Image (cartoon, grey):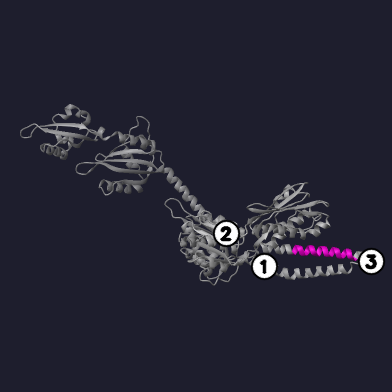
Amino acid sequence: MAEGMLELDGNEIVGRALSDFLGVEDAAVLLGHSRAGSGPIQIRTEARLGTRVPLDAQSDNLGVAGTALTLRVSDVTPAQRSAGELRLAGALEAGGVGIFEVDIPSDKSVVTPKWLEILGFDTAPGATFDPQAEWLARVHPEDTARVAASDAACYAGETEVTDTTYRFLRPDGRWMWTRSVSVVSERDHRGNPQRLTGVQFDLDDHYRLQAQLAASQRRFRESVGNSPSPTALCSLGGAIIDANNAFCELVGFTYSDIIGVTLSTLSFPDDLEASRNRIDALRRGTLRRYETEKHIRRKDGSGCWARLSVSYDPGTEGMDGIIVAQARDISRDKELDEAKAQFLATMSHELRTPLTSVHGAIRLLSQLYADESQADGVKRLLSIAETNSKRLIDMVNDILDVERLTAPDTVFDFEPSPVADIAREAVESVAAAAINKNIRVTIAEEAEGEAMVDAARLGKAMEAILSNAIKFSDPESEVILRVCSDENDVTVWVEDSGCGIPVSFRDKVFDRFTQADSSSTREQGGSGIGLYVSNLSVNRMGGRIGFQSEEGIGSKFWIRLPRIDAAGTTASPPAKSSLPSILHVEPESGFGDIFRSALKGQAEYVRAGSFAAAVRLLDSHAFDVIIVDLDLPDGNGRDILDFAGDPPPVILGFSNSETSWSDPRVTRNLVKTRTSIDDILCIALKAAEDHQ
């Protein structure tokens, strides 16, 4: 037994001193332990090849003076290698983790096949080498001291674990990244480290991917840095941490000066609070992205207009999130808008007025020659002049309508209106054109139903659709109008039996200045913007417009609008919820739909389309925030404050006017043309959260 453990034969053992096998100190410990009459003690001895073998040793004192001892030893290595350890080792191996064990006194190691595979050594049967010596020789010179220091700290008990990542030279000549995690798994009775057990990881792919990612990020930064699009990266506090040259040029800062400047610093006083609210909303996660037109304050105090797109990047594990701000200089666009507005004002006065005068004069001349039979030639010329001057006036009006409808400050006069009444008036307006072509225009169905609309603009949209139906219908045919209604919508249908719309043109029907036949020889007149204006108007009123058509059979155009009840509301009051509740007193249903979609999942939203509807809701429900439009179809928004309750909720005044609400109950005044939808949502949500 002893021969096998010590790797010696019997002749080499007999007659030798105990200290030859155990060492002087361990032999003395065993002798002292024997004299004390204690049980077994675990010691270590060194075999011929230098391997330290753990032994369970027990001595018996046979002599009267204690000069004779019987020493019984057993190898406890198998016992220390429990079944649990073996299962763990197998699991680690299966997971691609190598295992090593170093006998610290002899500086020899035992390793698993996976350890050899990870570090690139030959794992073929019969391959022999000294793993510890090979490992020490192949650690990168720049990493050797750090690895040794980590091991030394663990040996000394300063740290429980030695965990080092370092470069290693594989036998094939390639440097790789690897990681060793180990613990001192055995110490002797004096606390000296005897055995180091650890695991080996292959980090080469990880570091290679990291290097590729870093290179990709460098290329990205270089491309952003050279991009003509102004871009800045900001901390969650809004401080700029990086910016490209285009952004620096836009705001008038040098690169060194822009670092640390906050986005709020680039705001003028009237936009400062809104800017802070937006940044706060990004920080809290209420918003992930917003776009707005911003008047940027440059370093020298001057201003420039930019279309600002700001988004939040949460970052990856171990990295802080950042705010990404991208800008587009729209100062030139603003100048062009101003020039266009001046041009339209000039055209409205300088062109429309004389055209109206010319048309009126021609009509008077036509009346003077009405009974003069000998002036048939003159009457014909006057008729041509009257028709074409009217067409010119209509075209100028259409162009002005387009520009007015696309302007952000265009005001619609919303009021609850019976859609069937507007349809009847539209039919009467086109009666003359129908008679001229000998076409019948009939109303086949008049369902009841009101919508919150600008009656005049809705009427013009219906007239445009009816005029087109008449224009493209054959004489002696019929154009049919129907008003249908259900619990949600009121729909107006206009059906003709004309030529239909070519398939190739159907996606252009609502574009401006387009016609199916735009050649100079087309039979039908018109500017090609009537349906474009109709589409703009209906969309602004919260409705939709569309058509069905078949060539050679005819077309059906429809206008669908949200139906309102007698009180002017299109939504039910919010049920009890943990979310904050917001009442929006707003006559424009389309505007309300935008709010409802944006606030989904963040607040309970209800819109009241009139003063009466708001009062009815406030009488039966409590809200955290009320957004009140000053201009309501059936009253003044200020009067709603008297019904808000005591104490009142947070009240936000909202109107087209620059004049602030002079009422202490109003927390904040918002101007529609100067406050973006994103800003309004931020302000409303923050106010609702604070009120809760």
Instruction: State the count of labels.
Output: 3
- Magenta region's main secondary structure? helix
Q: Secondary structure at mark 1?
A: helix
**Mark 3 neighbour density, 10 Å: few (under 14) some (14–19) many (20 or more):** few
Q: Nearer the viewer, residue 578 or 398?
A: 578
- Is residue 118 shown to the viewer in this render? yes
Q: Is 512 on the left or on the right of 130, as rendered?
A: right
Q: Disc number at residue 107?
A: none
Q: Nearer the viewer, residue 234 or 671?
A: 671
Q: Amino acid at mark 2?
A: Arg
Would you name the residue on which mark 3 appears? Answer: 374
Q: Nearer the viewer, residue 236 or 240?
A: 236
Would you name the residue on which mark 2 appears? Answer: 607
Residue 129, image x, y percentages: 32, 35
Residue at the image point whose x is 49% and y is 50% from the top: 216
Residue extending farthest bottom: 662
**Mark 2 neighbour density, 10 Å: few (under 14) some (14–19) many (20 or more):** many
Specify start and end residues of the magenta stretch as a single range.
378-396
Disc nearer the start of the sequence (2/1): 1
Q: Disc number at residue 341?
A: 1
